[in-house]
Image: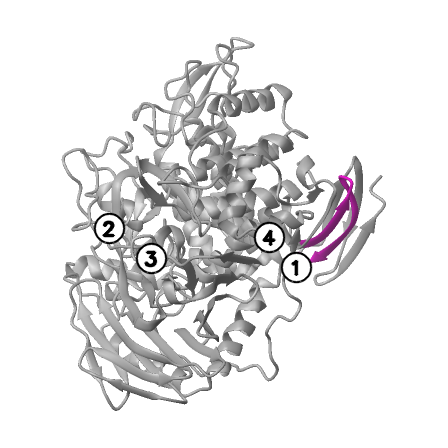
Amino acid sequence: MGRRRALALAAAAASLPALGGLPAFAASAPPRRPTTSPMATDGTGTATRMWYRAPAGPKTMLERALPVGNGRLGALVGSDPAQELLFVTDATLWTGEVNDTLDQEGQFPYGRDDFGSLTQLAHITVDIPDHDLGSVHDYRRELDLAQGLVSAGYVRSGVTYQRRVFASAPDDVIVVQFTQRGGGHYTGTVSLDGTHGESTSGDGPLTTLSLDARFANGLRYGAALTAHSASGSVSVTDSKIVFTRCADLTLVFSGGTNYSPDPRDGYRNPELDPAALAAAKVRDAVSLPATGLLHTHVADYREQFDGMRLSLGSSTDAQRALDTWERLKARTQQDEPDPELEALYVQFGRYLMISSSRGSLPVALQGPWLDGNDPDWMGDYHTDINIQMNYWMADRAALPRSFDAFTDYCLSQLPVWSDLTRRLFNDPRNRFRNTSGKIAGWTVAFSTNIYGGLGWWWHPAGNAWLCNTLWEHYEYTQDRGHLTKIYPLLQGACEFWEARLVPMTVTDAATGERREVLVADKEWSPEHGPQDSRGNTYAQELVRDLFAHFREASTLLGRNAAYSRTLAALQERLYLPEVSPKTGWLQEWMSPDNLGETTHRHLSPLVGLFPGDRIRPDASPATLVKGATELLTARGMENFGWANAWRSLCWSRLKNAENAYRLIATNLRPSVDGTNGSAMNLFDIYEAAKGRGIFQIESNFGTAAAVIEMLLYSRPGHIELLPALPAAWADSGSVTGVGARGGFTVDLSWRDGRVREATVRSVGGRRTTVTAGGVTRDVRLRAGGSVTLRNFR
């Protein structure tokens, strides 16, 4: 990096109110330890417990292993009695660089050597040779969503053996605990293997294995694994931990990189020694009683998970008797609702969010759960649906703190995004460059990495969609601190579009009147159709909302009144999409003809329906709502998991409960040999090729968000209860802690398809209307106040 550019980045970074959160891997003060047991004693039930009769193996980890995570570290856990296997990923372990060049096609290079890729950190293998599957019985493994625990148990020679695995955020470690009842013991070895050819060293006195390495891009990384037993013998050779006749055994792992969310240091902390820090963390953790580590983790995890409880009705005894995989298959084969399984799927999404989005980077395409070092699309952040869909669920599902990682990421990348936009967006090779020749603010490409780097094509409207997602978090929380943090992002995006919009004369189809409007310059409606059309519905809708959000933010913060007036004038002139007289659909392009694929996976022209809110049945012209409905119908009901989730959300906004539910049921189909659907471990699988499936985590989050949207719709000043309740859940149900825009949370119960009771709490909101069953109530609350409403008849 040249000195001039480094100074420019430093100046840009210094102007921000914050540069993201704490470094991803850092020393921390001792956590608060619970004084009483936080372990759940209510049986938690089938809606929060996944279980199986067989383990995962080395070749089936992505589809069968159960995930644990503490926000930065994630692990897939196999639970084989004779060979416990953990695939560990650190969300900051990225190859690549800032990637600040364009090729002759005007694209940013997009490969593992230039753009870079997320990769695994290590494999942990615990070999217990005499516990092979053939010698054990009554095997069962579980993921307890209510407590954040993976467990496995079996009986061998009359002895009951058990193990627990969890990823603790307070102690920043992954813990594996082996116990038994009946006088048994464990004998075997533990190995720690890097995934990039690193060598592992052993420290006998500390019974610790460690690795210490560096990528070619300068990123340092390290890991440490230690073992302890109150019985038997534990020792370390050069490359393995050996344990003999141990009635109990506790393994503690930690690791990370010297990634730092600060462009002024090139996103690396030169003072941090990851291997030494990892060793310190495992020494501190293993010095504590195993129960203390467990209780600290569960108390911390439950503080977030307990924020939302969900019942969609009762399943049958026959359904409950099946393990999770058999239950998925039975639901599809019998085509019968399984309300407790459907509620479990939502809680699994919340579990994944807590486990992958806290105190570090936001959730990328596969989250921190890889089965190799070659994740599809490099495991990056796609800005045309992936990262936005990942966070549709957070505020709705009582996880507003999980959203902070997304905010912090955008803030930390802004200086580099601004620099690349200034230097490269108007490059002659960029087909999307501004024909005005002007440039200001910032935007992104379709793919981004953690070094501010961009990949594939420029994505001009991506900045607006990122900003609108950030704004929606404010709508839920009414947090002025958040609004202050994101304000530079909003302003820079507006400045980019002020320089980009171009005038065009259009003719009103109804009146024949000619008028001048402002349209987006050459655009691509993701990811199909012409790449040089102007005024795409996708961009027009996003920019309209961006301007409106910036203007409201400016009013709330008392800033930039003159610039707000400038944007108000631009917003007034923006072209808004029309309904095609040929197809009857809401137009995707400024053409009555369909210029793309009718059943394309993306719903780009419907961003004004969801996640936007300009198109809605209770306020928009009937012709516009009908045009959106016809387009959504044409897009079809069968696609990849994330596309089905988006469709379900749109049908919910249109109050078509059965279509919304049908798409959720489609995503719950079992994936066999890589077909679209849910894997054994409920990861959503995208069929890329015959026999090969790809995990895309936004599908899990998007489907969970769709379920919640069917139970509660909100916009600032208005809440609607049960807007799209399907027949499958109509008998009875309840949900607590659902976020509502305008600064509220709602507890809700229903019977026979009608609201029984709703409690509305203010988290910053003052006034809203609440509607159910055609009855509207006006609610006025002080911050922190609540009211319970009944008799919606």
**Under tag 2, what secondary structure?**
loop
What residue sits right under mark 4 in the picture? 321
What residue sits right under mark 2 in the picture? 374
Label 2 to label 1: alpha-carbon separation: 43 Å
Q: Earlier in the sequence, mark 2 or mark 1?
A: 2
* Label 1, residues with CA under 10 Å away: few <14, some 14-19, many ≥20: many
Mark 1 or mark 3: which is in front?
3
Label 1 to label 4: alpha-carbon separation: 40 Å
**Under tag 1, what secondary structure?**
loop
> Residue 359 in the image: x percent, y percent?
43, 66
Residue in the foreground of this view, choosing between 334 and 253: 334
Specify start and end residues of the magenta stretch as a single range.
Answer: 745-764
Instruction: Identify which residue is drawn at 47% across, 20% down.
Output: 587
What residue sits right under mark 3 in the picture? 57
Q: Tell me which amino acid carries mark 4.
A: Ala
The quarter of the picture where the N terminus appears is: bottom left
